[in-house]
Amino acid sequence: MTRTPRFLGVAGLLAAAAGLAATLLSAPASAATTPVEEHGRLEVCGTRLCGEDGTPVQLRGMSSHGLQWFDHCLTDGSLDALAHDWGANVLRISMYVQEGGYETDPQGFTNKVSELIDEATERGLYAIVDWHTLTPGDPNYNTQAAKTFFTEITRRHADKDNVLYEIANEPNGVSWSSIKGYAEEMIPVIRAQDPDAVVLVGTRAWSSLGVSEGSNEQEIIANPVNAENIMYTFHFYAASHREPYLAALDRASQQLPIFVSEFGTQDYSGDGANDFAMAQRYIDLMAQRGIGWTNWNYSDDHRSGAVFQPGTCNAGGPWNGSALKPAGAWIRDRI
């Protein structure tokens, strides 16, 4: 390399500056790095989620509402906004099994989830495939359907580095041992075609680590799922789930890999007044512990927990500003 003389004089300095400017102007602009380009395939390392280089990663983003009701809110425009304006790095694709969901049209819903994985991938987002079981609360009720669904989804997308699998949204009215048994039956189905995928396991009592049914994280610590590269899910709604729930998340996250795959600033119905102060305490704890999260929900449902004002999706946006409800503006700022 030829070194520039230390003293160029005015003419030399001007010439050097002109040459540098020409070089910079002619250089191709590099595209911004997407989350998946930055972190690659994720894995569980201790109690954290880490990128390919072993560096901890905190996923922050949004969950869709049920695809049977609000798939029209997941458009090119809204997903571009989520990735580029909101700055999210993950989309949770929430596919109900009952309540007019998957069981009414297995192939149609499988195709829709598959399309949304592709849409997330195009934008460099991580995608959580949410097998959204709610009623009945025993995930074993849907085991055969879950095997069919995850076999097809992994067949189509195992070559991607950005897909995580949530195998049971909110188990309820069922023991931890039964949930664990379901997980140990389902995880090999996913690993058969996507052996390195991170799997999210729902916990007892609407994914409250058992708190909503009088238990706590100790039942999981004493009897963990027999599988590697998994995380346990925790859900909360700040206006309903207060000190005992926050304390459980604090304790559990120091011993177990936890992912908050659903939460809201309202009550547990996803509606009602926002408790931003309590929600901020959760946000601060999740930041401190590096716990990933997706907020409920990226739609224009009439409830206060849906981020957009009613009618926004049919109007094609906008996806920020006056189109946001208070909860939407709040969570966009925190993503």
Image (cartoon, grey):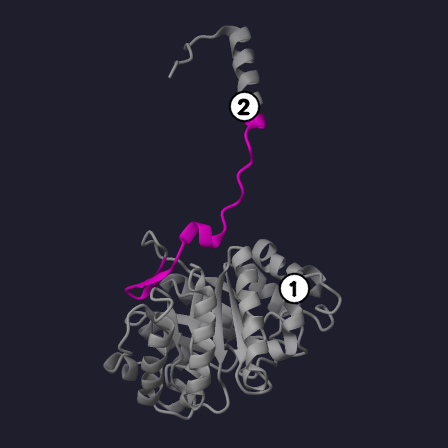
Residue 81, located in which quarter of the rendered image? bottom right
| Secondary-structure class at tag 1 | loop
Q: Residue at x 43, y 67 (%)?
A: 164
Q: Residue at x 71, y 61 (%)?
A: 318
Residue nearest the observer in this picture, 148 or 325: 148
Whether label 2 touches label 1, CB < 8 Å = no
Residue 240 image offset from top left, x and y in percent = 50, 82
Residue 216, located in which quarter of the rendered image? bottom left
Q: Amino acid at mark 2?
A: Thr
Crowding at label 1, few (<14), some or many (≥20) Cα neighbours within 10 Å?
some
Position of 52 compared to 121: left or right? left
Query: Which residue, as the protein is rendered here, is positioned at the far right?
Result: 315
Whether residue 22 can be seen here:
yes
Magenta segment includes 36: yes
Residue nearest the observer in this picture, 245 or 61: 61
| Secondary-structure class at tag 2 | helix
Magenta segment includes 149: no
Q: Which labelled disc corresponds to residue 23? A: 2
Q: CA distance from mark 2 to mark 1?
A: 40 Å
Residue 170 image offset from top left, x and y in percent = 45, 83
Of labels 2 and 1, earlier in sequence is: 2
Q: Which residue is mark 1?
A: 75
Q: Amino acid at mark 1?
A: Thr
Residue 74 image offset from top left, x and y in percent = 63, 67
Residue 299, located in which quarter of the rendered image? bottom right
Residue 282 image offset from top left, x and y in percent = 45, 70
Residue nearest the observer in this picture, 52 or 194: 194
Q: Which residues are magenta?
A: 23-50
Whether residue 325 can be seen here:
no
* Number of numbered callouts drawn: 2
Q: Which labelled disc corresponds to residue 162? A: none
